[in-house]
Image (cartoon, grey):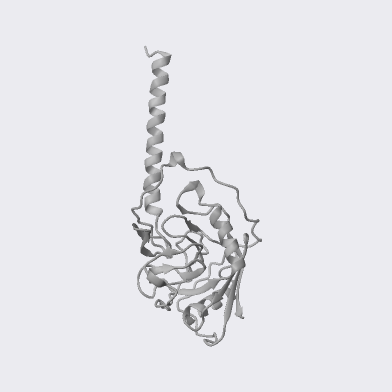
Amino acid sequence: MVSNEQRRRQLAREKFARQQERREAARRKARRRNAVIGAGLAVVVAAGATAYATGTLSGDGKKDTTDAAAPDSSTRPSRGPDPCAKAAPGSPTTKTWKSEPAMTIDKSASYAMALKTTCGTIDVKLDAGKAPHTVNSFNFLAGEGFYDHTSCHRLTTSGIYVLQCGDPKGTGMGGSGYTIPDENLKDPRLKDGVYPAGTVAMANTGQPDSGGSQFFLVYQDSKLDPKYTPVGTIGEAGMKVLKKIADAGVQDGAPDGRPNATVTIDKATVAKS
């Protein structure tokens, strides 16, 4: 007959084994998720002298595959407070298009994009002269209400420092249905492969000319393979909003994943400035 003490020890061993299994599962999941940014993109980044190898992030039906170390789940902090307000009523669109929209912007004019989010407005100066296809796409999608009521689904806090948005599905696997060409990849601001804080750039699949609707906002200098179209620069007020989102961290204390802040774009607009 098993004594109470023996039974207690057996239960403790079983509980410990379950905890170890959960931690290992969390590590595997984090390794799969620890891509950088993407609408299915593949990048290699470096933090200091350490290479941060990544695979792909879901986008347009593609799955994540990565192999980056994850922190022990037992040391992760609980979810912190949400610094953002409640989203405006409404749902993301389900519209997609088969081809890139016709060029309607004035390439010689200045354009600005305003992302009115639940955390505050992020203002962006767009570079129509150097990235006309990308700015034209933003102008088209904003006019169609494509970005309205969409969530910024990914925050990275290790290796690179970006917030990713632009997917109506909120999973990293959605998009506009069409692709646009890469542009402005030799921008002198991308010195030594560093996307400086304040940069807005397009996510892609890792293949040439595969950008769509998803984009990322850089809140801290990030070393990236220079193949993601830099399309604009965030203003000072917008950077404060972005920093607030970043400071709230990632859910479960992971280095990469859904942000603690419930960042929803209530309304996106593009206009001549």
Q: Residue at x 52, y 54 (%)?
A: 259
Along the line of sight, the residue nearer the viewer: 160 or 263 = 160
**Image quadrant where residue 185 sits:** bottom left
In x, y percent, where is residue 266?
62, 64
In x, y percent, where is residue 130?
47, 82
- The relative height of residue 204 versus residue 46 in the rendered view (above or below) is below
Q: Residue at x 46, y 73 (%)?
A: 230
Residue 140 vs residue 65: left or right? Answer: right
Residue 211 vs residue 80: left or right? Answer: left
In x, y percent, where is residue 190?
42, 72
Q: Residue at x 53, y 67 (%)?
A: 94
In x, y percent, where is residue 62?
38, 62
Along the line of sight, the residue nearer the viewer: 236 or 61 = 236
Q: Quadrant of the C terminus?
A: bottom right
Instruction: Work out whether residue 122 can be spotted.
Output: no
**Image quadrant where residue 21 sits:** top left
Q: Residue at x 38, y 70 (%)?
A: 192
